[in-house]
Image (cartoon, rainbow, N blue to C red):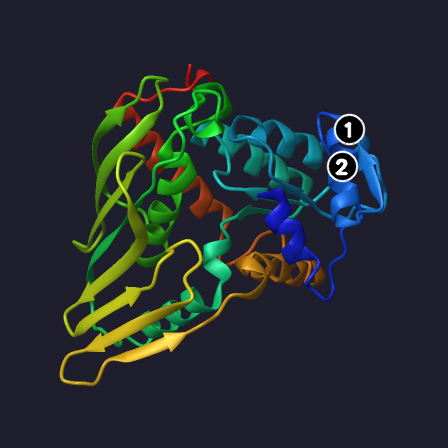
Amino acid sequence: MAGSFIRALQAVEDATPVAVASRSEPRALAFSEKFGIPQYYGSYRQLLADASVDVVYIATPHSTHSEICIACLEMGKPVLCEKPFAINASQARAVIELARKKELFLMEAMWTRFVPAVEKLRELLQQQRIGNVQIMLAGGAYMPDPDPEYYLFNKALGGGILLDAGVYLVSMASMVFGRPGQVLATGELGDTGVDEHEAILLSHQHGEIASLYVSHRAKSAPDLTLLGNKGKIYLHPPVFCPAGLTLCVDGQPEEVFDFPAPAGGYHYQVREVNRCLREGRKESSLMPLDETLAIMETMDEIRRQLGMRYAADL
């Protein structure tokens, strides 16, 4: 993730990578040499003391997000934190409250919100091209190597498919429908104790339904379909960085919109961070902190129903 992000960062006109930090100085050195970053540090505290750093991007294991976010904010650094924003809502709330107390910018790195295809999706929904949207159907499945030490299967690192992949679907449902009024979830935990396979049903304020699935036990390209009373919109896979969408309005020819995402699509969120910082904003209107917290609360409830708990929940 850090490598993909830095390649995108280097493609942004008004952003410059100035330092990288790791828990291991040799790893930080190797990363800095690979990507031409001027400074490297063997601890996060050293990086946070660097006056040349204007904003910090966090791409550490899930289980360390809130701790490092808090360290950044305590040192006066604005933060872009990779999803999942935290392990649970309690951690997320603590980070958000600190950012607001310190009056510092903070944003969840939900890059999907900022790619052109999703911008187009919001435009079509605003125009009510498919009428009143009633149903979201979304999901994806992939099968990584079942190494128990790999972060996806390692409970101590915040493993599990919900926080890694399901978060995209819950976030999209939140973007379209708002906070769910009811959450129903079923699924299975694997041998390492993390969730590997689940289906989620969310019901929303005006009767809208989001039917979602994620799995490490099958294979399917992650996509998303919205159904309205006048047609449907199909967001092309992969749902986390779609390069296009198809609009089907009753009685009209199908329309296909193509939006190639250069640099992997990560640079759009960097531009949003820079825009907010230039304008003195403390959060993004496209990924507001209250919504990030609500998404974490929804995922807490999903995990509760699945019987999936981390040490941070205890």
Q: Amino acid at mark 1?
A: Pro
- Considering the numbered disc 1 on the image, is that residue within a helix, a strand or a loop? helix
Residue 30 — which label? 2
Q: Is residue 75 visible in the rendered structure shown here?
A: no
Is residue 255 toward the left or the right of residue 227 in the image?
Answer: right
Which is nearer the eye, 79 or 137? Answer: 137
Q: Quadrant of the N terminus?
A: top right
Is residue 103 toward the left or the right of residue 309 in the image?
Answer: right
Q: What number of labels is visible? A: 2
Say above or below: 314 vs 9: above
Q: Residue furthest bottom?
A: 252
Do the residues bearing badges 1 and 2 touch, measured as CB atoms within 8 Å?
Answer: yes
Residue 306 — which label? none
**Residue at figure coordinates x 32%, y 35% from the top left:** 216
Q: Position of residue 54 (x, y in %)?
A: 77, 49
Residue 26 — which label? 1
Name the image quarter holding residue 223.
Answer: bottom left
Which is nearer the eye, 97 or 33? Answer: 33
Q: Amino acid at mark 2?
A: Ala
Q: Position of residue 27 (x, y in %)?
A: 73, 31
